[in-house]
Image: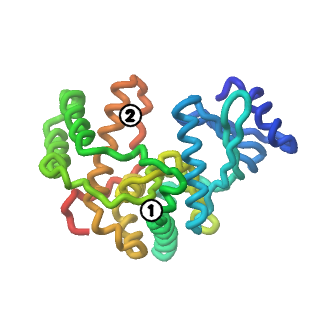
Amino acid sequence: MMTDLAGYRGRITAVYPHLAFNNVKTNDEGMINRVIIVDDAWVFRFPRNDDWATADLENEARSLSLARRYLDMALPDMTLHHDEQGLFAAYRFISGRPLQRHHIFSLSTADQDRLAGQLARFLRQLHTIPAEEVVSHNIPQSLTNRTQEKWEMLYADVKSELFPLLMGYAKEWVEYHFAPVLADPGWMAYDPCFMNGDLGPYHLLYNPKTRLLNGIIDFGTAGIGDPACDFACIMNQYGESFLQRMMVYYPEIEPVLDRARFRAGTLELQWLLGGLRSGDNSWFGVHLGRGMDRLPYGANA
């Protein structure tokens, strides 16, 4: 819970004096922004850091401005405001609940296909935004990008910090999983595109009545990067079986499946490292409730 709600309210009412503040919800769980939802109508986000968090919010606003020109999906129409205390963002509230795996797989086959088609259309439209448009909007590389050196460094960190805690079969899996990347510096090469990078359930707003998404929020990690990162998010959250449903509507997913499988497989290792290094036990529960039907690289879809 925020300790300075009155201060945030003052900053909001200076720009939006008409708001009644009858119903105020706060979300202080995000690592980058503090969030206030007013009257289930407006969302306000305040960067935690005046430097990098502010720059991220500015980049997100540019990314959303571009994406809204090309995508059918409802996205935040973000406005940035500058005052004496810094920067904050505002946009109209998009209703919906986090899209959970059980929401998807309790649907009929036809409704699963409709939802898969909606998500596939969103990603295809996003990934095919012209490169010159991305450049003209001053959108940088995505924070999710990793060089070959960084993949090798992750493997080295896993061996030094996690191997002492792992059983033999788990170590064998890690070695198998990283083998193609370590053997071939070009294995993770990709054609860059505009991508999101953080398609978590809490960013996909599901409507149980329509059995579709009302919208998608948070483009904080959006930028120029590997489209396989977005597919890895879907795979990690909902399983490869659902991603394969999406391939009917976005066949270009199939050629990059192995990169998505590799990326998805490294996420739990990254969370384990984060938990050990930070001393924050919440990192160890990040993987709960996620899809576990990911195939190993090289498997036939």
In screen coordinates, is 150 left or right of 279?
left
What residue sits right under mark 2 in the picture?
284
The colour scheme used to paint the residues is rainbow
- Quarter of the image with the N terminus is top right
Percent across and percent down for residue 155 are: 21, 38
Q: Mark 2 falls on what kind of element?
A: helix
Q: Is residue 105 visible?
A: no
Name which residue lies at 58% across and 43% down.
Answer: 58
SS at circle 1:
helix
User: Looking at the rendered structure, which numbered label has been put on residue 65?
Assistant: none
Label 1 sits on what residue type? Ala
Observer-nearest of 15 and 36: 15
Question: Is the C-beta separation of discs 2 and 1 under 8 Å?
Answer: no
Figure check: 225 above or below 124: above
Relative height, residue 143 to residue 241 (above, below):
above
Circle on res. 131: 1
Among the 4 quarters of the image, the one containing residue 259: bottom left
Residue in the picture at 75% in, 43% down:
38
Task: Locate residue 161 relative to residue 26 in the image: left or right.
Answer: left
Quarter of the figure with the C terminus? bottom left
